[in-house]
Image (cartoon, rainbow, N blue to C red):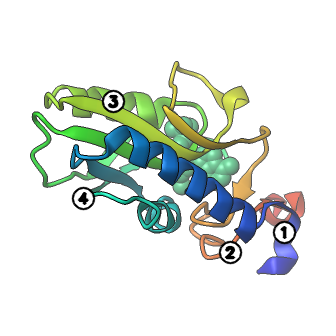
Amino acid sequence: MNNDIERVLYSQDDIKAACQRLGADITRDYAGKKPLFIGVLKGVIFFMTDLLRELDFLADIDFIDVSSYHGGTASTGEITLVHDIDTDISGRDVVVIEDILDSGRTLAYLRERLSERNPKSLKVCTLLDKPEGRVVEAKADYVGFNVPNEFLVGYGLDYVEYYRNLPYVGVLKPEVYAN
Ligand code: IMP
Ligand code: MG
Protein backbone atom coordinates (compact mmCIF):
# COMPACT_ATOMS: atom_id res chain seq x y z
CA MET A 1 0.00 0.00 0.00
CA ASN A 2 2.78 2.47 0.95
CA ASN A 3 4.46 1.86 -2.42
CA ASP A 4 1.50 3.48 -4.20
CA ILE A 5 2.19 6.82 -2.49
CA GLU A 6 4.19 9.48 -4.35
CA ARG A 7 4.81 11.64 -1.29
CA VAL A 8 3.59 12.19 2.24
CA LEU A 9 1.84 15.52 2.70
CA TYR A 10 0.99 15.32 6.41
CA SER A 11 2.68 12.87 8.74
CA GLN A 12 1.13 11.31 11.83
CA ASP A 13 2.86 13.99 13.93
CA ASP A 14 1.53 16.81 11.72
CA ILE A 15 -1.99 15.41 12.05
CA LYS A 16 -1.70 15.00 15.81
CA ALA A 17 -0.56 18.62 16.15
CA ALA A 18 -3.51 19.77 14.02
CA CYS A 19 -5.95 17.76 16.16
CA GLN A 20 -4.50 19.32 19.31
CA ARG A 21 -4.76 22.83 17.87
CA LEU A 22 -8.33 22.35 16.62
CA GLY A 23 -9.30 20.57 19.83
CA ALA A 24 -8.07 23.52 21.87
CA ASP A 25 -10.00 25.97 19.65
CA ILE A 26 -13.21 23.94 19.89
CA THR A 27 -12.82 23.43 23.64
CA ARG A 28 -12.47 27.19 24.07
CA ASP A 29 -15.57 27.89 21.90
CA TYR A 30 -17.89 25.14 23.20
CA ALA A 31 -17.04 24.59 26.86
CA GLY A 32 -20.29 24.23 28.81
CA LYS A 33 -22.47 23.94 25.67
CA LYS A 34 -22.72 20.15 25.18
CA PRO A 35 -22.58 20.27 21.38
CA LEU A 36 -23.45 17.39 19.07
CA PHE A 37 -20.68 16.35 16.68
CA ILE A 38 -21.88 14.93 13.39
CA GLY A 39 -19.25 13.00 11.44
CA VAL A 40 -19.59 12.63 7.68
CA LEU A 41 -18.91 8.99 6.85
CA LYS A 42 -16.80 7.21 5.98
CA GLY A 43 -13.71 9.36 5.51
CA VAL A 44 -14.06 11.20 8.81
CA ILE A 45 -13.70 8.29 11.21
CA PHE A 46 -9.96 8.57 11.82
CA PHE A 47 -9.99 12.36 12.22
CA MET A 48 -13.13 12.34 14.34
CA THR A 49 -11.82 9.84 16.87
CA ASP A 50 -8.51 11.71 17.22
CA LEU A 51 -10.08 15.18 17.34
CA LEU A 52 -12.79 14.33 19.87
CA ARG A 53 -10.25 12.90 22.30
CA GLU A 54 -8.66 16.37 22.40
CA LEU A 55 -11.88 17.94 23.71
CA ASP A 56 -12.39 18.52 27.38
CA PHE A 57 -16.17 18.84 27.77
CA LEU A 58 -19.34 16.79 27.43
CA ALA A 59 -20.41 16.11 23.87
CA ASP A 60 -22.32 13.47 21.96
CA ILE A 61 -21.79 12.15 18.48
CA ASP A 62 -23.78 10.98 15.49
CA PHE A 63 -23.00 10.12 11.88
CA ILE A 64 -24.36 11.00 8.48
CA ASP A 65 -23.38 9.40 5.20
CA VAL A 66 -23.71 11.17 1.89
CA SER A 67 -22.21 10.14 -1.37
CA SER A 68 -20.92 12.30 -4.18
CA TYR A 69 -18.19 10.19 -5.71
CA HIS A 70 -18.92 7.08 -7.61
CA GLY A 71 -15.57 5.41 -7.56
CA GLY A 72 -13.30 7.86 -9.39
CA THR A 73 -11.15 10.84 -8.50
CA ALA A 74 -13.65 13.47 -9.67
CA SER A 75 -16.97 14.30 -8.08
CA THR A 76 -20.12 13.70 -10.09
CA GLY A 77 -21.91 16.66 -8.57
CA GLU A 78 -24.96 14.84 -7.35
CA ILE A 79 -25.26 14.28 -3.61
CA THR A 80 -27.38 11.52 -2.17
CA LEU A 81 -28.21 10.88 1.48
CA VAL A 82 -27.11 7.35 2.29
CA HIS A 83 -27.60 7.36 6.08
CA ASP A 84 -29.21 10.06 8.20
CA ILE A 85 -28.48 10.99 11.82
CA ASP A 86 -30.97 9.79 14.41
CA THR A 87 -30.47 12.64 16.88
CA ASP A 88 -33.00 15.49 17.08
CA ILE A 89 -30.86 18.59 16.49
CA SER A 90 -33.47 21.30 17.08
CA GLY A 91 -32.09 23.79 19.60
CA ARG A 92 -28.70 22.02 19.64
CA ASP A 93 -25.24 23.39 19.01
CA VAL A 94 -24.05 21.26 16.12
CA VAL A 95 -20.55 20.80 14.73
CA VAL A 96 -20.21 18.90 11.46
CA ILE A 97 -16.87 17.14 11.07
CA GLU A 98 -15.49 16.44 7.59
CA ASP A 99 -12.32 14.87 6.26
CA ILE A 100 -11.92 17.20 3.29
CA LEU A 101 -13.74 20.12 1.71
CA ASP A 102 -13.31 20.10 -2.07
CA SER A 103 -16.05 21.24 -4.48
CA GLY A 104 -18.11 22.30 -1.48
CA ARG A 105 -21.18 20.42 -2.71
CA THR A 106 -21.27 17.98 0.20
CA LEU A 107 -21.06 20.75 2.75
CA ALA A 108 -23.61 22.97 0.95
CA TYR A 109 -26.00 20.01 0.89
CA LEU A 110 -25.43 19.21 4.56
CA ARG A 111 -25.87 22.81 5.65
CA GLU A 112 -29.19 22.94 3.84
CA ARG A 113 -30.46 19.62 5.19
CA LEU A 114 -29.36 20.29 8.76
CA SER A 115 -30.35 23.99 8.94
CA GLU A 116 -33.98 23.18 8.14
CA ARG A 117 -34.09 21.15 11.38
CA ASN A 118 -33.48 24.33 13.41
CA PRO A 119 -30.24 23.73 15.28
CA LYS A 120 -29.26 26.51 17.69
CA SER A 121 -25.94 26.82 15.85
CA LEU A 122 -24.20 24.97 13.04
CA LYS A 123 -20.45 25.02 12.51
CA VAL A 124 -18.09 22.95 10.45
CA CYS A 125 -14.66 21.51 11.18
CA THR A 126 -12.62 19.92 8.39
CA LEU A 127 -9.17 18.40 8.57
CA LEU A 128 -8.35 19.39 4.99
CA ASP A 129 -9.56 22.23 2.80
CA LYS A 130 -8.88 22.27 -0.95
CA PRO A 131 -9.97 25.84 -1.86
CA GLU A 132 -9.05 25.49 -5.56
CA GLY A 133 -11.59 22.68 -5.91
CA ARG A 134 -14.53 24.86 -5.00
CA VAL A 135 -17.55 24.77 -7.35
CA VAL A 136 -20.17 26.08 -4.92
CA GLU A 137 -19.62 28.41 -2.01
CA ALA A 138 -18.70 26.56 1.18
CA LYS A 139 -16.63 27.53 4.16
CA ALA A 140 -15.48 25.66 7.24
CA ASP A 141 -15.17 27.34 10.63
CA TYR A 142 -12.23 25.18 11.73
CA VAL A 143 -9.61 23.99 9.24
CA GLY A 144 -6.64 21.70 9.88
CA PHE A 145 -4.69 22.30 6.66
CA ASN A 146 -5.23 24.04 3.34
CA VAL A 147 -4.17 21.54 0.70
CA PRO A 148 -3.14 21.79 -2.96
CA ASN A 149 -5.49 20.68 -5.72
CA GLU A 150 -4.25 17.09 -5.90
CA PHE A 151 -5.93 13.79 -5.22
CA LEU A 152 -5.09 12.74 -1.67
CA VAL A 153 -5.45 9.46 0.19
CA GLY A 154 -4.94 8.20 3.71
CA TYR A 155 -6.15 8.96 7.23
CA GLY A 156 -9.71 8.30 6.06
CA LEU A 157 -9.45 9.52 2.48
CA ASP A 158 -9.97 6.81 -0.08
CA TYR A 159 -9.39 5.97 -3.68
CA VAL A 160 -12.12 3.47 -4.68
CA GLU A 161 -12.52 2.69 -0.96
CA TYR A 162 -8.86 1.76 -0.40
CA TYR A 163 -5.98 3.57 1.36
CA ARG A 164 -8.19 4.90 4.17
CA ASN A 165 -6.08 3.10 6.74
CA LEU A 166 -2.78 4.81 5.83
CA PRO A 167 -1.80 6.64 9.04
CA TYR A 168 -0.76 9.79 7.10
CA VAL A 169 -2.17 11.90 4.26
CA GLY A 170 -0.35 11.42 0.97
CA VAL A 171 -0.52 11.94 -2.76
CA LEU A 172 -1.27 8.83 -4.77
CA LYS A 173 1.04 8.04 -7.69
CA PRO A 174 -0.85 9.03 -10.86
CA GLU A 175 -0.18 5.62 -12.43
CA VAL A 176 -2.28 3.99 -9.70
CA TYR A 177 -5.47 5.60 -10.93
CA ALA A 178 -4.44 5.61 -14.59
CA ASN A 179 -4.83 1.81 -14.57
P1 IMP B 1 -16.94 17.91 -2.03
O1 IMP B 1 -18.41 17.60 -1.96
O2 IMP B 1 -16.45 17.99 -3.46
O3 IMP B 1 -16.52 19.10 -1.22
O4 IMP B 1 -16.16 16.66 -1.51
C1 IMP B 1 -16.23 16.19 -0.25
C2 IMP B 1 -15.93 14.70 -0.25
O5 IMP B 1 -15.23 14.28 -1.43
C3 IMP B 1 -15.04 14.35 0.89
O6 IMP B 1 -15.77 14.05 2.06
C4 IMP B 1 -14.27 13.16 0.35
O7 IMP B 1 -14.97 11.96 0.61
C5 IMP B 1 -14.21 13.38 -1.13
N1 IMP B 1 -12.91 13.94 -1.57
C6 IMP B 1 -12.63 15.19 -1.99
N2 IMP B 1 -11.34 15.35 -2.33
C7 IMP B 1 -10.75 14.14 -2.12
C8 IMP B 1 -9.39 13.67 -2.27
O8 IMP B 1 -8.44 14.38 -2.64
N3 IMP B 1 -9.20 12.36 -1.95
C9 IMP B 1 -10.19 11.54 -1.49
N4 IMP B 1 -11.47 11.95 -1.33
C10 IMP B 1 -11.75 13.24 -1.64
MG1 MG C 1 -14.85 9.63 -0.22
Depth check, mark 4 against mark 1: the one in front is 4
| 88 left or right, relative to 52 | left
Instruction: Indicate which disc, 4 or 1, sits on the residue closer to the N terminus.
Output: 1
Any mark on residue 5, and which? 1
For the N terminus, the quadrant is bottom right
The residue tagged 2 is 166
Question: Which amino acid type is marked by label 1?
Answer: Ile
The picture places residue 158, in percent across and down from the top left corner, at 61, 63
Question: Which amino acid type is marked by label 4?
Answer: Leu
Q: Is 32 situated above or below 86?
A: above
Report the Cα–Cα distance between label 2 and label 3.
29 Å
The picture places residue 122, in percent across and down from the top left corner, at 30, 32
On the question of residue 69 being in view, the answer is: no
Q: Nearer the viewer, residue 86 or 48?
A: 48
Q: Is 32 situated above or below 9?
A: above
Report the Cα–Cα distance between label 3 and label 1.
33 Å
The residue tagged 4 is 58
